[in-house]
Image: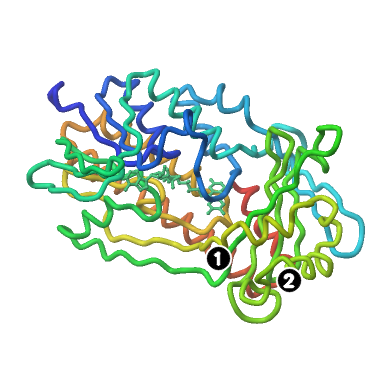
Amino acid sequence: MQADARELTIIGGGLAGALLATLLAQRGWAVDVYERRGDPRVHGYAGGRSINLALAERGLHALRQAGADGEVMKQAVMMRGRYVHPLHGEPGLQRYGRDDSEVIWSISRGELNIVLLDIAESHGARLHFDHGLERVDFDAGLAAFRHHEIEVVRPFRALVGADGAGSTLRGQIGKVLPLNERTDWLDHGYKELEIPPAANGDFRIEPNALHIWPRGHYMCIALPNDERTFTVTLFMPHKGDYPCFEQVQDADDAQALFERDFPDTLPLIPALRHDYEANPVGTLGTLYLDRWHLDGRAVLVGDAAHAMVPFHGQGMNCAFEDCVALADHLAANASLADAFAAFEAQRKPDAEAIQQMALENYIEMRDKVNDAAFLLQRALELA
Ligand code: FAD
């Protein structure tokens, strides 16, 4: 490949976009990253969903390739097992392995994103915040972005879509190439709540664990944050038999549900009533596409290519693996089209297998309702 061809424009400066920018800039590529949101290092992180994430060995391995693991792990909280809180009976820790060599890590999405953006920039990637992709003219090689109130148009050699599950680039590719895009939406959603630190500033419950309150076809989980809080996620059906989001709508409904089914969490979540009404119900789905790239002009990675339900704890981990694979194929192939095709051929079957496993875990959780959280946890352990 010609030296002047080593230019890529990445759409989305989230988890995959920032890591890919680092991997490519390290290898001498000229990389521009266009991110719709403002700079989280200036304005604070405006993520809007899943405040923390379980990082497993697959994702950590990718971070090592970029030399980002050291900085990221400074913020991580080790989770050495599941801490199960039954409705009746004693809660207890079930370790993942014999010792701390077999653990997963809880990391803040916002902190992780900021660390990765800093590293990408330090390697020479150019970051353009407040630039939301709107339209692409693939023949002319021009991309139009919304920058505050104005439209700016930039030339590109090739685009990488790291712009998440609702990818605009995917929509633009779909206009010139049939992608056969379909999303299977789950009939379960989620809502996030918070356990703040104790009065003495310490964690309120065991910090080095993934906490689970299994309740059959619904459950709460809690992951620790390094500022000594926990992010609690309530997973529940949208509609149907009680409890479901349709029937548990306001603060009084939430209070009644938690008094009945999660009584031990009530002293832990003092702002339950406020959080329940303030925080939205998130939707969960699996995205399928027939293809991930438009010859040598555009390719999709991460959630933009293969969003999945979170019951395998692998969406980000899988997105990070994509980044390593794409960077490797770009190094090994003489043309962008060949690199994108080789990337798709390698990663699409893997991603589809992980999507399927995540879905099967959900179906098992729905149908074999006795210990839904155990199934989620088992999946996380396999990560
Ligand atoms: P995103 O993180 O969504 O980033 C996309 C970026 O693109 C964003 O910064 C966005 O602002 C930007 N963008 C969007 N549109 C445009 C545009 N038009 N122009 C420019 N920029 C744009 N994964 C795990 O591995 N472990 C877990 O424990 C885990 N838990 C989860 C829990 C929940 C409730 C959910 C919903 C997901 C979870 N995931 C987990 C999945 C994980 O969040 C995603 O797989 C991961 O964020 C994908 O990264 P991404 O960079 O592809 O997309």
**Amino acid bearing label 1:** Glu
| Beta carbon of the mark 1 residue lies under 8 A of ligand 1 | no
* Residue 314, above or below 65: below
* Residue 13, above or below 223: above
Label 2: how many Cα within 10 Å (few below 14, some 14–19, many 20+): some
**Going by the picture, which residue comes out furthest to the front?**
149
For label 1, the SS is helix
- As drawn, the label of residue 360 is 1
Location of residue 237 by image quarter: bottom right
Label 1: how many Cα within 10 Å (few below 14, some 14–19, many 20+): some
Location of residue 32 by image quarter: top left
Horizontal side of 236 relative to 149 (left or right) equals right
Q: Tags 2 and 1 in contact by the CB under 8 Å rule?
A: no
**Amino acid bearing label 2:** Asp
Q: Earlier in the sequence, mark 2 or mark 1?
A: 2
* Residue 126, above or below 217: above
In this view of the protein, which residue sits in the foreground, 356 or 267?
267
Q: Name the residue under label 2.
A: 253
